[in-house]
Image (cartoon, grey):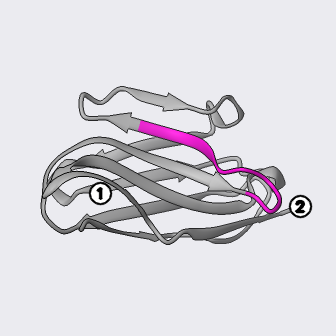
Amino acid sequence: QVQLVESGGGLVQAGGSLRLSCVASGIIFSINTKGWYRQAPGKQRELVAAITGSGSTNYADSVKGRFTISRDNARNTVYLQMNSLKPEDTAVYYCNFKGYGRGDFDSWGQGTHVTVSS
């Protein structure tokens, strides 16, 4: 199995910045997509940003221009730089990797809390 561990969440004031990290471990031959999702209380989980093996990126409209997803393939790591944070960005953030190891995998991290105060 592939395990993901997130870090970097916390409490920040509106307008501030945070950087989330997610590192994968286990038997991994290739990772097709690395993504960040979030789930606010009472809401469904939503895609925040994703990056493919070729480097193509995709962002939710609500975070475009404020968040940047990046990766370190050698370390099986993905980052989410979050700038100009807003109270509506408050949520639990999860990373997700899809790829191939001992068969196809679609793995999730345990989540990291981000709270933005107004």
Residue 62 at x, y percent in the picture: 71, 34
Q: Residue at x 19, y 59 (%)?
A: 75
Q: Residue at x 26, y 65 (%)?
A: 2
Question: Is there CB contact under 8 Å for labels 1 and 2?
Answer: no
Q: Earlier in the sequence, mark 1 or mark 2?
A: 1
Q: Residue at x 65, y 51 (%)?
A: 45
- Local packing at callout 2 (Cα closer than 10 Å; few below 14, some 14-19, many 20+) is few
Q: Nearer the viewer, residue 29 or 23?
A: 29
Q: Which mark identifies residue 77?
A: 1
Instruction: Please report the bounds of the magenta region as a residue range.
Output: 40-50
Q: Residue at x 30, y 30 (%)?
A: 55
Q: CA distance from mark 1 to mark 2?
A: 31 Å
Q: Answer whether residue 45 is magenta in the image.
A: yes
Residue 31 at x, y percent in the picture: 23, 45
Q: In the picture, which quadrant includes the N terminus?
A: bottom left
User: Quick one: SS at disc 2?
Assistant: loop
What residue is shown with label 2? 118
User: Quick one: SS at disc 1?
Assistant: strand
Q: Answer whether residue 74 is magenta in the image.
A: no
Closer to viewer: mark 1 or mark 2: 1
Q: Amino acid at mark 1?
A: Thr
Q: Is residue 48 left or right of residue 95?
A: right
On the image, which quarter does residue 27 sit in? bottom left
Residue 103 at x, y percent in the picture: 16, 52
